[in-house]
Structures are given as C-alpha cells and as structure tokens.
Image (cartoon, grey):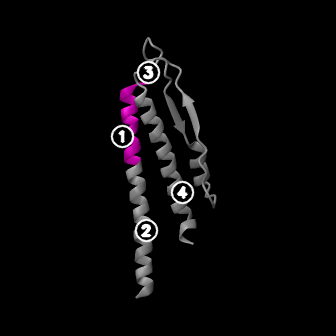
C-alpha cells in the first residue's frame, strides 16, 4: 500500500524530527534574554541508524535532548542567538529538501499510474 511505503514513512519521520528541532530552536531564541535559561539541542542519530539498516515499518522518533551548561553571559544564559539563527536556517533548508523529495515520490507514483492507465 502507498502509505506504508518505507520511503514515505522515512521522509515523514524526518519531517517530524525537523519539526521538533525547529520548535526547540525557536524556544531557545524566544528565551535568549531570559536570565539563567539553558539552551537545548536535540539529536536523532538512532533514527538515522535504523533507517540505514533498512528496517521496515514505522520509524519512531527517538530524540535525545541536551542542555548547554556553558554560560554565554554573566546572567548564566547559554543561548547564542547567532548559532540558533544559523541552526534555524539549516533546519529550513533541510525541510525544503524533504518536502521536495516527498513531492518527487508522488510525481513518480503519478507517472506510474498514468502509464498503467494508458
């Protein structure tokens, strides 16, 4: 079935991960002036490893969130707005690539269906 296709499932999981990362980056930026706030980051290596091994079925998000304990300022805030802005842009570019890849998958399916119905 189309919706159980491993490529689509993997891309959906990738978008879910990027969405989670984007929310975390925006949360960090929103708290850039909050005294004592500790910036957080998230990693998804386990998902990428499972995908490379070609496991079938659902790809579940297994996120690990890290807290930065190296204060950037005297008020113990650890948010680096420049670093977070760059990470937000990188996240945006990755999301665009994922959406394009999903669009390509549907274009391929559309082409195959059109060839079959001729």
Q: Which residue is mark 3?
A: 34
Instruction: Kindly identify which residue carries mark 4.
Output: 10
- The answer to if 81 sits in the magenta stretch is yes
Q: Is residue 25 above or below residue 59?
A: above
Spot occupied by residue 53 in the image (x, y as percentages of width and height): 62, 54
Looking at the rendered structure, the secondary structure element under dot 3 is loop
Predominant SS along the magenta part: helix
Rate crowding at label 3 as few (under 14), some (14 to 19) or many (20 or more) other CA atoms within 10 Å: some
Quick check: is 16 in the magenta stretch?
A: no
Examine the rendered structure and indicate whether residue 108 appears above or below residue 67. below
Q: Earlier in the sequence, mark 4 or mark 3?
A: 4
Name the front one of labels 2 and 3. 3
State the SS at label 2.
helix
Asked if the residue under mark 3 is in contact with the one under mark 4, i.e. CB atoms within 8 Å, the reply is: no
Residue depicted at 56% across the width and 30% down the height:
66
Magenta extent: 79-94
Mark 1 or 3, which is nearer the eye?
A: 3
Give residue 104's position: percent from left, percent from top.
Answer: 40, 65
SS at mark 1?
Answer: helix
In front here: 74 or 114? 74
The structure residue drawn at horizontal position 40% and vertical position 63%, both measured from the top left corner, is: 103
Residue on which disc 2 sits: 106
């Amino acid at each position: 079935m189309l919706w159980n296709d491993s490529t689509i499932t993997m891309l959906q999981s990738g978008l879910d991960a990027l969405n989670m990362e984007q929310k975390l980056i925006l949360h960090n930026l929103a708290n850039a002036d909050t005294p004592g706030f500790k910036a957080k980051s998230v990693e998804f290596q386990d998902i990428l490893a499972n995908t490379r091994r070609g496991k079938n079925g659902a790809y579940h998000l297994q996120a690990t969130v890290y807290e930065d304990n190296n204060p950037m300022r005297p008020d113990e805030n650890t948010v680096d707005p420049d670093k977070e802005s760059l990470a937000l842009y990188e996240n945006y570019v990755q999301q665009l690539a994922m959406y394009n890849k999903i669009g390509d998958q549907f274009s391929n399916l559309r082409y195959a269906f059109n060839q079959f119905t001729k």
